Image: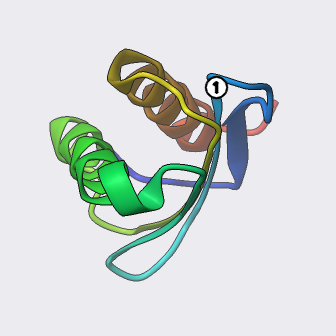
Amino acid sequence: MEIRRKAVAGTLESSDALVEIEPGRGVAVELESVVTAQFGAAIEKTVREVLKEFAVENASLRVVDRGALDCTIRARVEIAIKRAAEEEK
């Protein structure tokens, strides 16, 4: 899936995550989390799995996690991808 524009999903509320995605070269993931030491690798793995599921090969992502569950992170990344892939209206 081609990332056409910048898009955002989620919030900075507790137990949520804010995902920003924009066109890029290759895949770059920047992670900021209150639990990076414990779960940073798992969060990044989840993000990259969702990107792979949607065949995203060129994107730059910034994930600001506030203790979100894995399912929430997946949902936020998926919505950001779908928003970014849409044509501007």
Q: Quadrant of residue 11?
A: top right
Q: In the rendered view, would you say 38 is above or below 15?
A: below
* For residue 12, above or below residue 58: above
Colour scheme: rainbow
Total of numbered circles in the picture?
A: 1
Q: Quadrant of the N terminus?
A: top left
Residue located farthest toward the bottom when viewing the structure as drawn: 25
Which quadrant: the C terminus?
top right
State whether residue 37 is above or below residue 66. below
Tell whether 3 sits left or right of 26. Answer: right
Question: What is the three-letter code of the residue carrying label 1?
Answer: Asp
Q: Residue at the location (57% across, 36% down)?
A: 80
Displayed quadrant of residue 62: bottom right
Number of other residues with Cα within 10 Å of mark 1, as a class: few under 14, some 14 to 19, many 20 or more: some
> Could you tell me residue 51's position as x and y percent?
28, 46
Q: Residue at x 55, y 67 (%)?
A: 23
Task: Name the residue nearer the viewer: 78 or 40.
Answer: 40
Relative to 60, residue 7 above or below: above
Q: Secondary structure at mark 1?
A: loop
Q: Quadrant of residue 84?
A: top right
Front-lying residue, 69 or 2: 69
Q: Is residue 26 left or right of residue 79?
A: left
> Most extreme residue toward the front, as rendered?
38
Identify the residue at horizontal 19%, vertical 43% (top origin).
Answer: 49
Read off the residue under disc 1. Answer: 16
Residue 15 falls left or right of residue 89: left
| Residue 58 in the image, given as x and y percentages of width and height | 37, 68
Instruction: Estimate the x, y position of residue 73 in percent, counting from the top left.
Output: 45, 30
Residue 74: x %, y % from top left: 38, 27
